[in-house]
């Protein structure tokens, strides 16, 4: 048996992004590993440490036994503490140590994927011990690694892969959050619709409809006379949704129509990653 067909797109997206990350960091001088990235509190080294840690957990490796310093200003909740453990334990690793561990981890993960025969619905351990399906875990993992590839590209001034397989996964992961953003967080009126129109390397138009019970659903059919409409480019969409850009910095890249209060409420709740 081999990888289930529904899992193959996530394996392909991960492979594309992790190989891009490896190519980006392989030639870096020691000092370049300390460059700040758009991910709050994390350097290039920290991002690569996080990616290695994510893959080690996908491999089922035990988590490091490590005590975090108390002065990490960007760590404010248990989820962030969980993620920071794999990062802080590698903070003093040299460039050769980082690239060597990354390459070894990629080899191990490729071997795991070649031998992966489990059903997509198989339950696996997620962050903080939460249970999730293998399909959800691989989808989220492909998304995370692509977002962090983009963090590295921004930090190193090497833009690219905004339309890669990982970008397609990211589109679906981020859009899945929008019914809740529109219906619950922004409190859109019942029996209304909101349109999100994104252009650039990844283009799409989606309608979020709010039914009479206040539940939101995502549709591909355009809405006539929506309560609000937002138009923005793909990179801005990603950076806002992933907390890599402030609303103020993105203001001149976003066009809104319809109810200004509803549009503002959606934009205030645009960030979906923790």
Image (cartoon, helix red, strand yellow):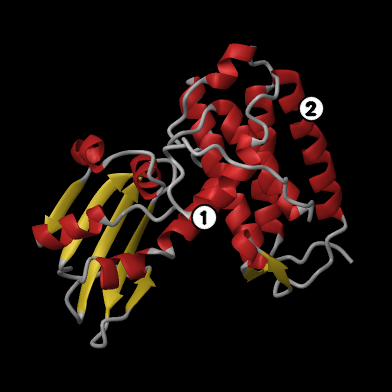
Of residue 51 and residue 136, the one placed in the foreground of this image is 51
- Are dots 1 and 2 in contact, CB under 8 Å? no
**Closer-to-camera residue (114/241):** 241
Identify the residue shown where x is 56% and y is 27%: 44
Q: Earlier in the sequence, mark 1 or mark 2?
A: 1
Q: Residues within 10 Å of mark 2 (few under 14, many from 20)?
A: few
The answer to which image quadrant residue 104 occupies is top right
Residue for badge 1: 79
Badge 1: how crowded within 10 Å, few (<14), some, or many (20+)?
A: few
Residue 112 in the image: x percent, y percent?
A: 84, 53
Which quadrant, please, contains the N terminus?
Answer: bottom right
**Residue 229 visible (yes or no):** yes
Q: Residue drawn at (58%, 57%), measured in percent from left and top?
A: 140
**Residue positioned 47% across, 20% down in the render:** 157
Using the image, determine if residue 69 lies above or below residue 220.
above
Q: Position of residue 87 (x, y in %)?
A: 61, 38
Residue 14 spot, x, y in % from top left: 66, 47
Question: In the drawing, does residue 259 fall left or right of residue 83?
Answer: left
Q: Residue at x 61, y 36 (%)?
A: 88
Tag nearer the camera, 1 or 2: 1
Measured Cα–Cα span from mark 1 to mark 2: 28 Å
């Amino acid at each position: 048996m081999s990888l289930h067909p529904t899992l193959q797109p996530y394996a392909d997206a991960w492979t594309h992004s992790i190989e891009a990350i490896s190519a980006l960091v392989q030639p870096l001088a020691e000092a370049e590993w300390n460059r700040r990235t758009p991910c709050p509190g994390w350097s290039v080294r920290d991002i690569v440490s996080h990616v290695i840690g994510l893959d080690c957990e996908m491999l089922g490796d035990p988590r490091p036994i490590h005590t975090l310093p108390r002065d990490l200003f960007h760590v404010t909740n248990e989820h962030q503490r969980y993620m920071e453990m794999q990062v802080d334990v590698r903070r003093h690793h040299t460039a050769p140590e980082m690239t060597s561990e990354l390459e070894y981890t990629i080899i191990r993960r490729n071997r795991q994927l070649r031998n992966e025969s489990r059903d997509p619905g198989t339950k696996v351990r997620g962050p903080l011990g939460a249970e999730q399906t293998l399909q959800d875990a691989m989808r989220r993992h492909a998304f995370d690694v692509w977002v962090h590839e983009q963090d590295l590209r921004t930090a190193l001034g090497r833009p690219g892969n905004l339309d890669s397989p990982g970008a397609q996964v990211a589109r679906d992961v981020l859009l899945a959050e929008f019914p809740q953003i529109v219906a619950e967080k922004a409190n859109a009126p019942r029996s209304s619709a909101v349109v999100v129109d994104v252009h650039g390397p990844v283009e799409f138009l989606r309608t979020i409809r709010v039914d009479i019970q206040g539940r939101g659903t995502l549709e591909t059919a355009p809405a006539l006379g929506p309560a609000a409409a937002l138009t923005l480019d793909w990179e801005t969409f990603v950076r806002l949704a992933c907390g890599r850009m402030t609303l103020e910095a993105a203001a001149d890249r976003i066009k809104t129509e319809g109810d200004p209060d509803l549009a503002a409420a959606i934009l205030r709740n645009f960030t979906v990653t923790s």
